[in-house]
Each structure stands twice: as structure tokens, then as C-alpha cells.
Amino acid sequence: MTSLALEPASTLSTAERAALFTAGYEGYLLPFALDEAALALMEHAFDLEPEASLVARLDGQAVGLANLGLRGVDGWVGGIGIVPAHRGRGHGETLMRALVDAARERGIRQLWLEVILENTAAVKLYEKLGFAHVRELEVWSLPGDPGSTKVDPAGEAHTWLREHSTGREPWQRADETVARLGDLDPAPAGLLAENGAALVRVSAGRVTLLQLAGEDDAAVHSLLERVRGLGESVLLLNLPADDPAAPVLGELEATVVVRQYEMLLEL
Ligand SMILES: CC(C)(COP(=O)(O)OP(=O)(O)OC[C@H]1O[C@@H](n2cnc3c(N)ncnc32)[C@H](O)[C@@H]1OP(=O)(O)O)[C@@H](O)C(=O)NCCC(=O)NCCS
């Protein structure tokens, strides 16, 4: 049997990485397709490092991609996929073990990832490699109600959030992500109340709610109403299931689109 050859993902162009990422996620539990621009945004916002990420080849043909994000001693698996025709033959495991080695070699001490609860193949793979379950995260969708919500400077809202937030934000909502999105257009905007704050990114009428906290349910409720005023739809990625905002979202017309495990491998 031909063995898998591994090389840095930086040997491919961004467009080629996007095409391979999409092919590796064929049959995924959610619709998944990335173009070059969408991957470039992900790589920037989430500190995905193509030189540390890996492409897997069989007889020269690219059959898999594993993305590694790097932030100090923290690393993040920003997607791993094997094209359908080559799944179930140990290649995903080989690729993932190589990614763990690459993370270790770069000084990563904690390697994080998220995986959809029902993605049995991936959950089993991560458990086999020693990843531990940390907590459950929920992706929420809230219908928008475009109105006249005014935004405040992101910096002031972010300061309030940093002073009042208690829990650790998952990778895609972490302060580092907010800072990286600040380099882009549109940059994140803030909503500030006396007793709460939110950080959002609004693009093409769609609102991504990056961070949100309030001193009580009423504060969270009124912030969410203001967030809805910013666009046609609101997406809140990976809110910890025990976050105080979760029941308030439930009281509104928000729904959980998907549930994920956050998993961690200590290196
Ligand atoms: C997850 C994925 C990368 C696994 O790659 P793969 O090459 O098919 O997996 P392997 O053949 O290397 O299997 C390694 C281990 O994964 C687990 N696994 C893989 N497929 C499985 C399945 N269908 N059912 C249960 N466990 C499975 C097992 O633990 C297996 O070890 P074992 O053979 O000793 O039982 C692949 O299914 C994939 O690309 N899926 C689509 C994209 C995706 O969901 N990515 C993960 C997002 S978090």
C-alpha cells in the first residue's frame, strides 16, 4: 500500500488549500464550502499557520488537510479532513498524529479543538489520540430585526467585557480573534450598556456576535435586542452551554444550530 506523504500546507496556494479543505469535508454534518477569500479570513482571524499545517498526499495526489492555529503555548486544530474515497484507512489518524507532533515541536502545550457531538468518526479519532472532553459549546442562531441600533467603539465594549467576563472564551471568540478581526474591514463594533457589553462583526447584513456579557438577565436581554437591530440574522458561535446568556437566548426566538465538544490535549 502506498504510504501517506506529509508536507506543509504552505506548499499549496490559499485557493488550493480552500479547495482541499472543502473536498476533505464532503459529507460533513453541515453544508461546508470555502472559497479563497473565506479561508484567507479564517487563517487571519484564527491564526491558522499554513507552514505548521499539513497536506497529506497519496501518489502525489492531495487527499487530506489539517490546519493548525498557533497562539503562544496554545494551539488549535482548525479543521482536519480526508477526501471521502480515502477515509477509513488510517490516513486521518496518521495526519492527526503528525499535526500533534508539529504542534509539540512548535512549543504548544495545550492543543484545543471543537467537534460536533454527532461526528462520531472524528470524536473517536480524537479520543483515541488522548484528547479529553472539556465542555459543551453551542452555536446559536437568532433572527435579526434590522433597525436603528447604534454601535459604540469596539475598544470600550471590549474593556468592559475583559473586566467583567469570568469564563475562558473558546478559540474563535477569544480576545486574540477580536484583535485579528480589528485588522479587517468591517472591523468589530461594540454595544455598551451601563451593566453589559457586546462585540459584534456585521458583514453583508449578517451579524456575528463575538462576545457578550451582562450583570443580569435583563442586561443580556436588552443587549441581544440591540444586536438583532444590526442585521437580518445573528450567529453566536460556540457559546459555552453553561453561559448565563444561554437561557436568555432561549427566551428570545434563538435556536441552537449545533452542539460541539470542546476537547483538549495536554502536550
Ligand atoms: C474524521 C476523519 C478525518 C477521520 O479520517 P479517516 O482517515 O477516515 O480515519 P482513520 O481511518 O484514520 O481512523 C482513525 C480512527 O478514527 C476513528 N474513526 C474513523 N472513522 C470512524 C467511523 N466511521 N466510525 C467510528 N470511528 C471512526 C476510529 O477511532 C479510528 O481508529 P480505529 O480504526 O482504530 O477504530 C474523516 O472521517 C473526515 O475527513 N471526515 C470529514 C471531515 C470531518 O468531519 N472532520 C473533523 C471535523 S472536527
Image (spheres, rainbow, N blue to C red):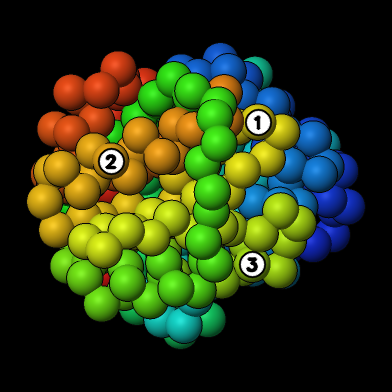
Residue 29 versus residue 165: which sits nearer the camera?
165
Residue at 46%, 82% (x, y): give it.
Answer: 72
Residue at image mark 2: 222
Dot 2 falls on a residue whose secondary structure is helix
Q: Which mark is residue 72?
A: none
Residue 112 versus residue 150: which sits nearer the camera?
150
CA distance for labels 2 and 3: 25 Å
> Which is more N-terminal, label 2 or label 1?
1
Q: Which mark is residue 205?
A: 1
Where 247 sits versus 179, above or below?
above
Q: Is residue 233 left or right of residue 49?
A: left
Viewer-nearest of discs 2 and 3:
2
Residue at 25%, 22% (x, y): give it.
Answer: 252
> Which is more N-terminal, label 3 or label 2?
3
CA distance for labels 1 and 2: 20 Å
Q: Is residue 47 left or right of residue 145?
A: right
Where 199 sits versus 90, above or below?
below
Q: Position of residue 187 (x, y in %)?
A: 66, 59
Q: Position of residue 140 (x, y in %)?
A: 35, 30
Q: Quadrant of residue 163?
A: bottom left
Q: Which amino acid type is marked by label 1?
A: Gly
Dot 3 falls on a residue whose secondary structure is loop
Residue at image mark 3: 182
Q: State if disc 3 and disc 1 touch (CB < 8 Å).
A: no
